[in-house]
Image: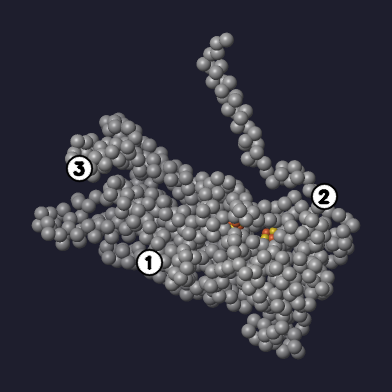
Amino acid sequence: MTEAWTYPEALWTVKDLFVYPNEYIYWSIQIVMYPLMTGLVAGAFVLSSLYHVFGLEDLKDMAKFSLVFSFALLIVAPMPLMFHLQQPLRGMEVFFTPHFTSAISAFGIVFFSYSIIVATEIWFVYRKFFVEQSIALKGKDGIGNSLKQLLYSVLTLGAYDIGEKALHKDEKAIKILAGIGIPVACFLHGYAGFIFGSVKANALWMTPLMPVIFIMSAIVSGIALCMFTYIVIMEWKKFRIKTSRKSWEVTAADVGGAEIDLIKNTSRYLVGFMIAAITLEILDLVFRGYTAVKSWEILRSVIYGKDFVDIFILQYGFGNLLPFLMLVIPGLTIRRTTLALILVIFGVFMMRWNVVIGGQAFSLSFAGYMHYKLPFIPDSIEMYKEGFFGALTIALMPFGLFWVINKFIPSLKYHK
Amino acid sequence: MSISRRDFLMSTLKVAVASALPLSAFKFLSPAEAKAAVEAANVRWGFIVDTYKCVGCGFCVKACKIENEIPYDAPVTRTWVERYLILKDGRMVADTPLGGRDGFTELKIQDEVIEPKEVAKAYFVPKLCNQCENPPCVQVCPVGATYQTADGVVLIDRTWCIGCGYCIMACPYGVRFFHPVYKVAEKCTFCYHRISKGMKTACVDACPFGARKIGNLKDPNDPVTKTIMTERVAVLKDEYGTKPQVYYIGLDENVR
Ligand code: SF4
Ligand code: SF4
């Protein structure tokens, strides 16, 4: 054969001992990013719903922000899959010709219904704002203003009634949508866990606990990311106001910054979900060790040997235990929280990594290992997409999107 | 004749339903129905590998690569041969350099040289797609690009595969890979283009020792069926419930 061929998988897979010839790390960094992103979506949404559904007043300010942020994350959620597909142009087939025995085929349906719920909820939350804006901007000079006016009047969808009765109805709708949204968000992510958990060929993935473990860690990561982004944005605003030349115009009391009370309240929920996630993961580990079926020998050598640092030091140590202690020790400060939050998100990333990459660290022969070398230098489009910078692109995308969305749908109060 | 609004709506509805029916019937044609429609149910392809006869020459791998246009030097292959050494201390070492394409000429195995006197037993095991009766690879394909034919062979539609790799993950035997040129899922097809024309697979034809045989399991007089019915045969990894249809003679418990 003279035809040009490539096999990028062979470049990032290092085989050791007895591995079948066709085995490689086929699911690499983007498949780590995929559950990470859907997890963040689900987590952010659940956080906002805690206020809307259960009326947890202490989360009020966080709720609006995390709802809009979850929308930005949602748009990015299918991107890792697109980066990963060998035939990205055919990706649409999953929506058009779904093969329903496959766990991935549900993605289209779950994703779209979830998008609709989130978008509708945002609309109800912001309807009053849209109406006010479109009225306020009417007749103002400047092309920018008239464009904005047009946008807002389109966004109202013609529903201009912002009387008390109408707004009350809105609130009811929000509550219902948030209520439906929680199970759907959990489903969106639980089923991402099912994609892995149902692969019977993979000894590490196959466990019915996988969807539940994924949901818990998703909520953890979502709450952590929302808190983190909130702190960064608020502190940045504070910094900007303080250092701007107009600083003397604003009194010290006006400068908001992140509110420690809000942070403290939210972190309580974070810690709760962290405990749930860890409990499940430990249960899974103990159960595997105790039942010690055929695959346990190789799994043990991966978990306690090859991947020990990744699992016990990076994931459980730095990603769980350390931030847990940081969050529960009294006298919580913004700085300490921020650091803990970064560690929590890192811990969830490591968890995804250890599942996706760890699940391919051993051969189906149970007599050999595969090691994944994350491609760093993007010397080809494949190496970019399935490499460090591809993952970074995905990770930064939601922030860019949020920045744009936030211009039209402001979800943060900068001043007290 | 005047028609009421109600009648008009009713008849419109009827037309709409009627015109929608054939479409939906077409759309929801299940694989089982398709199977019945094709009526190829008197053939079920099966395979026998006689590990006693295999000498590890790798001719089958060479033949397969050429026949099925898998780039010769690409590190993947539709069929391959494994070498197993069981040492006197009970240890098992195995390898499959280039899938056994060039035979096993090196004494080195898993980076160590094993002295012949240490070896208790040694043998070769050819592998290929098991054309499972209950194929998990077909189950997990999100777009139905991988499918099972009425005569039991699992195929991949190269024009429809999105290249997600889920089927590669789902096969317990590691037979699937991405085609190095077409970038879609790829695997052994029992040389479907040959067997459906009455020929044997390329590997069967290439094997000088008759270690590989293909036959119709629904035909009781087929030599392959007879062997499976009358001799002691085994399949690989039956614990996964995939019901593999490649049968092995002389399969050792050490084979992975
Ligand atoms: S051996 Fe693997 S690829 Fe072949 S039918 Fe069975 S599961 Fe599918
Ligand atoms: S790689 Fe192709 S054949 Fe395999 S599951 Fe994905 S779409 Fe189906």
Q: Amino acid at mark 2?
A: Asn
Mark 2 falls within which chain? Answer: B
**Residue at the extreme front:** A2
- Corner quadrant of residue B152: bottom right
Q: Chain of mark 1?
A: A
Name the residue beneath numbered marker 2.
B42
- Chain to which the residue tagged by mark 3 belongs: A
Q: Is residue B37 left or right of residue A10?
A: right
**From this viewpoint, is residue B242 visible?**
no
Q: Position of residue A305 (x, y in %)?
A: 54, 76
Residue that carries the numbered disc 3 in the rendered image? A142
The reply to whether dot 3 and dot 1 touch (C-beta < 8 Å) is: no
Q: Which mark is residue A343?
A: 1
Residue plotted at (30% across, 34% down)? A167
Quadrant of the image occupied by residue A344: bottom left
> Residue visible at 38% across and 69% down?
A322
Reply above or below: A294 against A242: below
Q: Earlier in the sequence, mark 3 or mark 1?
A: 3
Secondary structure state at the residue bearing disc 1? helix
Residue that appears at 68% across and 76% down:
B96
| SS under mark 2 | loop
Question: Would you say the beta carbon of the disc 1 residue lies within 8 angstroms of ligand 2?
Answer: no
Q: Amino acid at mark 3?
A: Gly
> Is residue B232 rendered to the left or right of residue B84?
right
Quarter of the picture containing the N terminus of chain A is bottom right
CA gap, disc 2 and disc 1 = 61 Å
Q: Judge the density around disc 2: few (<14), some (14-19), many (≥20) Cα neighbours within 10 Å.
A: few
Cα–Cα span, label 3 and label 2: 78 Å
Q: Amino acid at mark 1?
A: Leu
Q: Residue furthest left?
A: A248
